[in-house]
Amino acid sequence: MDLDRIKRLKNLKVIISEAIMVLIVVVTVIILALVVSGYWVNSDFEVERQGMLQVSSIPTGASVVIDGETSWRQRTNTSKILVSGEHTVTLTKEDYDSWSKIINITEGLLYRLHYPRLFLKERTPEEYYYLPETTYATVSPEYDLLLIANNTTDWLLINLTEENPKPRTIDISSLFQSTESTPDQMSGLFTGNILNASWDHDGAHVLCQVQTDSRIEWLLLDVSNPQKSVNITREFDSDFSDIQILDNSANNLLVIQNNNLHKIDVPNKSLSAVLIEKIIDYYVSNNEILFVAEQSNDALTTSYEIGVTKIGDKTRTSLFQVAGPVKVAQIQFYDKKYLAVLEGNTVTLYDRENLEEAIDYITSFKPDNMEVGHHGNFILLSSGVHLAAIDMEAGDVFEWIADNDGYNWLDYDMLYDVDGGNLFVYDYDGLNRRHLAENVSSHFPVTITDNKWLYYFSDDYLVREWIVKH
């Protein structure tokens, strides 16, 4: 027996086996890399570049029709591999209206449609509550609470998520300067004019801006315990041109006084020193403040600084200078953060980490306002009836003209118009416009709660409709 020969054969087998294993691993890695890059072999054994579509809907379980074709496996809340290029996606569900959009699939990338909403076709309006004296109404960020103001000192708070919600009275008689007592002492009069109202993220406080005969009042209303409310104007005996809630619990406010930015510590009732002088615009993201401030270079020239400072930090970082006043915001799309700068009719997105210019988006009009979508999937631009949305998923700009001046949110991703009492809803990009209701008041908010109820005001009534089967 030739032991050396046997050993050599065994070694050769081991080498061949290891080589085959390495080759399999290499081929597998290459195949996976090609799949991730969007390459795929179709039924005709042709290599195609593909991407992936992920579709969700409210309600769930809608059929997904792609380019006119569907199958029993294609339902929402699922993913599908598609050939790169343009596709028409349509969602249908029995007893509901339909939704459709033309999308462009990019090889090797995921395209998400997480916001489509279908509405029940047959709905019955239910007159829930009679509110004849309503002068102002506002809905919380989670679309679950409705604050209703009137000309008396007894305002109402309604929890819209309850099956049979009951209004709770909020006594504001001691909170505003713009109140008067009445002979019967049952309820006083509220004589101010509410200009604006904004909620904190927790839905526990509402910041009310009220015009009185002599000045503007700012009230931080604690809706669960009104006695803990703070009249900011009265407390500091100062006029503020703008106030924003800084944190979820409304313990801190950012205020503008004489064109300078300050912070108010509400529990300690203290006003900070100037944070930013000659403030033009600012945007709060987590514990950072992105700002635009005027810089006087000399007697003849003025430039504008875009910078960032952290809450509680006395230092600030200058990012870059621009020639004219701009608006700024920060948007996070997937795991990447961008600095959005609106100048004229152009929005420029910069990589937040290195400030390298990413891309310019140009509109046909000059926007006055810029708002980042709740999920970071779009930027909404507006000027009067002119609207535009930068769709981060599509990488494109969609423009349209609204029925009325301004825009209103129905939920996180849908807008609405009321034209001649007719309620129209549409996606943030102006698409899928649908008529939902008639005889709707344009003076008060329309909202969707718990993804099952549509609330609106009609002829002094708060009306509720089921928009899903129940």
Image: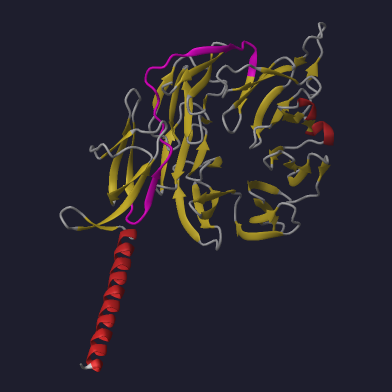
> Residue 283's x, y, as percent?
63, 47
Residue ID at (68%, 52%): 294
161 above or below 124? below
What residue appears at the point 81 percent right and 36 percent down from the top-left corner? Answer: 238
- Front in this rendered view, residue 469 or 366: 469
In the foreground, 410 or 319: 410
431 horizontally vs 215: left or right = left
* Residues rendered magenta in the picture: 106-135
Q: Position of residue 420 (x, y in %)?
A: 46, 17
> Is residue 237 at least partly visible in the picture?
no
Does 387 appear in magenta?
A: no
- Residue 58: percent from the left, percent from the top? 42, 32
Outermost residue toward the top in this view: 184
The image quadrant of residue 155 is: top right
* Screen quadrant of the N terminus: bottom left
Q: Farthest residue to the front: give it.
A: 1
Quadrant (top left, top right, bottom left, bottom right) of the C terminus: top left
* Location of residue 321 in the rendering, given as x and y in whole percent from the top left corner: 61, 59
Q: Is residue 112 magenta?
A: yes
Question: Residue at image x 76%, y 45%?
Answer: 263
Q: Is 7 situated left or right of 110 in this image? A: left
Residue 63 appears anywhere in the view: yes
Q: How is the image coloured?
A: secondary structure
- Residue occupying the point 63% across, 37% down: 201
- In the rendered picture of this protein, how many numbered marks are placed on residues? 0
Residue 44 as seen in the image, left or right of residue 137: left
Q: Is residue 274 above or below residue 400?
A: below
Query: Principal SS element in the magenta part?
Result: loop
